[in-house]
Every structure is written in structure tokens, then in C-alpha cells.
Image: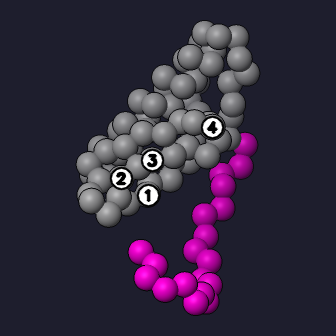
Amino acid sequence: MEEVKKYTAVLFPDPDGGYTVGVPALPGCITEGDTVEEALAMAKEAIELYLEASSDHGEVVLVETMPPIIATVEVRTRVRNAV
């Protein structure tokens, strides 16, 4: 039986170009893409494979019950030469 599940994908821009994508609800589910569109397509594929592998191994299929809160935190620092 197929059903539709939704997962949050977090895209991290790479300074050299492209994006790394993590799925907080699925530990270790990480992929990448050269553009936002490609990164999201790769995330969809990675999530599908992750869920399929979990099911095939008899593991509990993790479901995102509440999306994570993503926030920017501003801090003051005395660190020199930060990148």
C-alpha cells in the first residue's frame, strides 16, 4: 500500500557551489545537488530509498510528526579570522 508522507529537507549552501541536503527526521539521510531543484530531487530519492531500506530490514519507518523549527541565531564573538 502506498501513502504520501512529508519530510523536511534542509539545504546547506556549499561555498564552492551546490547544496548539501539533510533530512532531520531520518538520521543519516544526506545527499547533495548542484542546484536547489537538483538537491530537492536528490532528497526525494534519498528519502524514498531510506524508507524502503528501513522497511526491508524490518525497522520502524520514521515519520515526521512535527516539522523542525529552523531559526537563525545571532551571536557576538571575539573570534578572529572566522570563515
The reply, left or right, for residue 66 in relation to residue 11 is right
Q: Which residues are magenta?
A: 65-83
**Is disc 4 surrounded by few (<14), some (14 to 19) or many (20+) residues within 10 Å?**
few
Residue 42 place in picture, x, y as percent: 37, 37
Question: Can you tell which mark lies on residue 21?
Answer: 3
Q: Is residue 2 at least partly visible in the picture?
A: no
**Is disc 1 surrounded by few (<14), some (14 to 19) or many (20+) residues within 10 Å?**
some
Question: Can you tell which mark lies on residue 19?
Answer: 2
Q: Secondary structure at mark 4?
A: loop
Q: Are marks 1 and 3 in contact (CB under 8 Å)?
A: yes
Q: Secondary structure at mark 2?
A: strand
Of 38 and 32, the residue lying toward us: 32
- Name the quadrant containing residue 72: bottom right
Q: Secondary structure at mark 1?
A: strand
Residue 75 in magenta stretch:
yes
Q: Is residue 4 at least partly visible in the picture?
A: yes
Q: What residue type is disc 2 on? A: Tyr
Of labels 2 and 1, earlier in sequence is 1
**Is disc 3 surrounded by few (<14), some (14 to 19) or many (20+) residues within 10 Å?**
many
Residue under label 1: 12
Of labels 3 and 4, earlier in sequence is 3
x 63%, y 37%: residue: 27
Q: CA distance from mark 2 to mark 3?
A: 6 Å
Of labels 1 and 3, earlier in sequence is 1
